[in-house]
């Protein structure tokens, strides 16, 4: 694998994308980067205020029993440093800094990239390419012939990382609507490791950070939040938000990922978390195709699944932005009415939108998912909660014990070995033979009761007797079928790898 980066090195400045969700931490753990979760600051409660009144707060709910925290805050720079160490120790990855892709051609067999580098023009070929060139990759989007339609918001947001001691704030995310110290606008405060706090202020479109610093305004802003305490500014910046996505995330043998494919406002932490999910979705499907466990048709599902995820993220984040940044007088008055009512009206509180936090996308409508009429997706769950376990949803995690596998302590550690089948009761050997006959992909078949000795997984799944749960390599539930219905299992396995289905089910 060759990794190209147009930069000469990373820029280790600022917190940037800080909030990482449990299922992303699980992906990092599967790569040997579990320290990202350990090094991050775990926060458990989100509080929302209107002026000086708390409107509501909520905490995260885990249907399973994962040892990983629901969310940690850790700087993007730290995450990149940990991943760079892992990459450097991996002989199969060739990293080339200072390689700027200026042209791209592909045919039925390969992709050819033309790069400008300090060593001159270089051409690199590969069977497939994943482009994660960031928000500014307009030239590459033009080369690929994709659009990047959407919206850019006029309002600016001032971001400042400060180091200070703020007792009681260490595990809470705080969001303030219309506080006295930023009237008519918002302030967001996130705790970070090493007694660092990230503060975001919504500021007018013409805000000048240098002038603010020169006249002492930034110090005043910080003091209005933290009071008369010592503090140190670690990083500061001003930015605008965008809401955009490409019209395709697969262009022949090229897959598009991350900010290169979609941009969302950060209220809800759906940028980095969604980009990592893009990468995992692409990784297992490319592995299946390159190992001839599936045909190239499997990659079409990358486009449909991850573009649907991008649309969901845009919808959620854009709803938040419309509430945070009303675009006209009528919208401002509507928001003011909701906030005023929310002080005493629980129904109005439910209409206050301070950001719905990142959650895995639910592939319930994917062509790879076998629907179950008895297990139907119930729609977007309440804030902080996860949906019931149904086909398309990410399988809940929890403790397990597997004979001969002392390295495995929880369910999610097994899913990336290939297709996983959990049998609640019935003939495990028959299920294993049927799965092996259905696909050349590696598979693991386990009796659920043998590994889930405390019943945590069974309860999280609401598992019934004589069921087989088929789980994809990214942990999403592909199907739930009767253990005795081997043709249905075969059809579900075919569907999960985008192979032709010869049986109904």
Image (cartoon, rainbow, N blue to C red):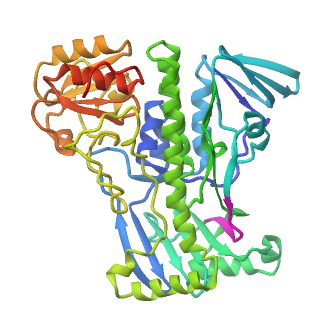
Count of number-bearing discs: 0
Kindly identify the residue that appears in the image at 37 percent across and 72 percent down. 57
Quadrant for the C terminus in the image: top left
Kindly identify the residue that appears in the image at 52 percent across and 30 percent down. 300
Kindly identify the residue that appears in the image at 35 percent across and 88 percent down. 344
Between 351 and 121, the one lying in front of the other is 351
Between 143 and 9, the one lying in front of the other is 143
Displayed quadrant of residue 43:
bottom left
x and y, in percent, of residue 54 in the image:
41, 81
Between 188 and 82, the one lying in front of the other is 188
Q: Position of 470 compared to 129: left or right?
A: left
x and y, in percent, of residue 6 in the image:
78, 35
Dominant SS in magenta = strand
Instruction: Evaluate whether residue 273 shows in this view.
Output: no
Displayed quadrant of residue 394:
top left
Q: Is residue 137 within the magenta segment?
A: no
Instruction: Evaluate whether residue 281 shows in this view.
Output: yes
Q: In this picture, is 330 found above or below 327?
A: below
Quadrant for the N terminus in the image: top right
x and y, in percent, of residue 156 in the image:
70, 69
State the extent of the magenta-drawn residues as a range. 151-162
Q: In this picture, is 189 found above or below 275?
A: below
Displayed quadrant of residue 346:
bottom left
Q: Position of 58 compared to 286: left or right?
A: left
Q: In this picture, is 170 found above or below 423?
A: below
Q: Is residue 157 within the magenta segment?
A: yes
Kindly identify the residue that appears in the image at 21 percent across and 23 percent down. 446
x and y, in percent, of residue 414 in the image:
33, 27
Q: In this picture, is 121 found above or below 240?
A: above
């Amino acid at each position: 694998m060759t990794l190209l980066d147009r930069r000469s090195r990373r820029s280790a400045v600022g917190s940037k994308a800080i909030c990482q969700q449990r299922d992303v931490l699980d992906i990092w753990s599967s790569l040997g980067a579990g320290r990202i979760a350990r090094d991050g600051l775990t926060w458990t409660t989100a509080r929302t205020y209107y002026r000086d009144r708390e409107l509501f707060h909520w905490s995260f709910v885990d249907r399973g029993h994962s040892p990983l925290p629901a969310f940690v805050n850790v700087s993007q720079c730290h995450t990149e440093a940990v991943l760079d160490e892992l990459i450097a120790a991996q002989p199969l990855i060739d990293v080339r800094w200072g390689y700027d892709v200026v042209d791209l051609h592909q045919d039925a067999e390969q992709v050819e990239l033309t790069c400008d580098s300090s060593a001159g023009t270089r051409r690199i070929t590969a069977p497939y390419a994943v482009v994660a060139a960031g928000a500014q990759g307009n030239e590459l989007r033009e080369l690929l012939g994709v659009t990047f339609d959407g919206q850019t918001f006029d309002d600016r947001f001032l971001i400042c990382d400060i180091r200070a001691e703020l007792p009681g704030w260490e595990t809470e995310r705080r969001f303030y609507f219309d506080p006295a110290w930023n009237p008519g606008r918002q302030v967001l405060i996130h705790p970070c490791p090493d007694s660092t706090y990230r503060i975001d202020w919504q500021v007018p479109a013409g805000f000048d950070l240098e002038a603010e610093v020169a006249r002492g305004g930034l110090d005043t802003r910080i003091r209005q939040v933290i009071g008369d305490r010592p503090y140190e500014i670690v990083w500061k910046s001003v930015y605008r938000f965008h809401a955009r996505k490409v019209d395709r995330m697969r262009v022949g043998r090229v897959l598009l990922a991350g900010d290169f494919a979609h941009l969302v406002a950060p209220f809800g932490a759906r940028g980095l978390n969604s980009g990592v999910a893009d990468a995992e979705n692409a990784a297992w499907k490319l592995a299946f195709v390159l190992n001839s466990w599936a045909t190239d048709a499997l990659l079409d599902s990358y486009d449909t699944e991850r573009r649907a995820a991008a649309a969901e993220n845009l919808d959620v984040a854009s709803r938040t932005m419309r509430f945070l940044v009303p675009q006209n007088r009528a919208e401002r008055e509507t928001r003011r009415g909701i906030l005023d009512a929310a002080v005493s009206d629980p129904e109005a509180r439910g209409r206050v939108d301070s950001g719905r936090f990142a959650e895995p996308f639910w592939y319930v409508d994917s062509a790879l998912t076998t629907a179950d009429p008895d297990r139907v997706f119930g729609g977007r769950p309440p804030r902080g909660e996860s949906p019931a376990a149904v086909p398309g949803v990410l399988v809940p995690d929890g403790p397990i014990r597997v004979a001969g596998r002392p390295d495995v302590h929880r369910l999610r550690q097994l899913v990336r070995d290939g297709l996983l089948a959990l049998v609640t009761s019935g003939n495990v050997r028959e299920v294993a033979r049927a799965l092996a006959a259905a696909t050349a992909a590696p598979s693991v078949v386990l009796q659920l009761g043998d590994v889930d000795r405390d019943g945590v997984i069974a309860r999280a799944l609401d598992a019934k007797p004589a069921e087989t749960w088929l789980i994809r390599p990214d942990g999403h539930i592909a199907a739930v079928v009767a253990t005795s219905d081997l043709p249905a299992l075969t059809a579900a396995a075919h569907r999960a790898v985008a192979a032709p289905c010869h049986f109904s089910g």
